[in-house]
Amino acid sequence: MTVRDFYANIGGDYEGTLANLLSEDRMKKYILKFADANDYTNLLAALDEQRYEDAFRFAHNIKGVCLNLGFSVLAASGSDLCEALRGGVPTDEVPALLDKVTAHYRQLTAELTRFRDEL
């Protein structure tokens, strides 16, 4: 699978990310680094433990990293969840927004696994 194929499979912004990172080699490096990040797992733990300020920070990290890497779908759902957690007081929308983040995260990580396996 090529980097371009990976971005097509996730509905990502290949061109914008290439313009920011300047080479596919750098894109590969950061794509693979994302696979090792713990923000999603930490987000789930923080929500489970009702540490909403921490949950906000992890959702914000997910949004930011995904925006920088052109992972558009997860960036959008991460942004929505981030806003629902802003201020440390979660809105009633959090469970549904977390479901979206989870679905998008799983899709992305499945493609990341395929991408890594095909290198």
Image: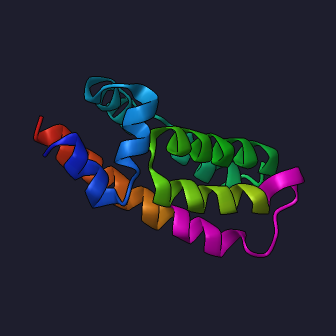
Left or right relative to 86: residue 62: left
Query: What residue is at 20 percent from the left and 44 percent from the top?
Result: 115
| The C terminus sits in image quarter | top left
Where on the picture, by quarter, is residue 10? bottom left
Residue 68's spot in the image, x, y percent? Answer: 52, 38
Q: Nearer the viewer, residue 54 or 28?
A: 28
Left or right relative to 47: residue 108: left
Residue 83's spot in the image, x, y percent? Answer: 76, 58
Report if residue 28 is visible in the image. Answer: yes
Whether 65 is among the magenta residues is: no
The answer to whether 13 is drawn above or below residue 100 in the figure is above
Query: What residue is at 18 percent from the left and 49 percent from the top?
Result: 114
Q: Which residues are magenta?
A: 85-101
Residue 20's spot in the image, x, y percent? Answer: 46, 31
The answer to whether 52 is drawn above or below residue 93 in the figure is above
Q: Nearer the viewer, residue 18 or 6?
A: 18
Residue 17's spot in the image, x, y percent? Answer: 42, 38
Report if residue 36 is visible in the image. Answer: no
Left or right relative to 101: residue 16: left
Question: How many numbered markers are drawn?
Answer: 0
Where on the picture, by quarter, is residue 28? top left
The answer to whether 51 is drawn above or below residue 81 in the figure is above
Query: What residue is at 28 percent from the left and 46 percent from the top?
Result: 112
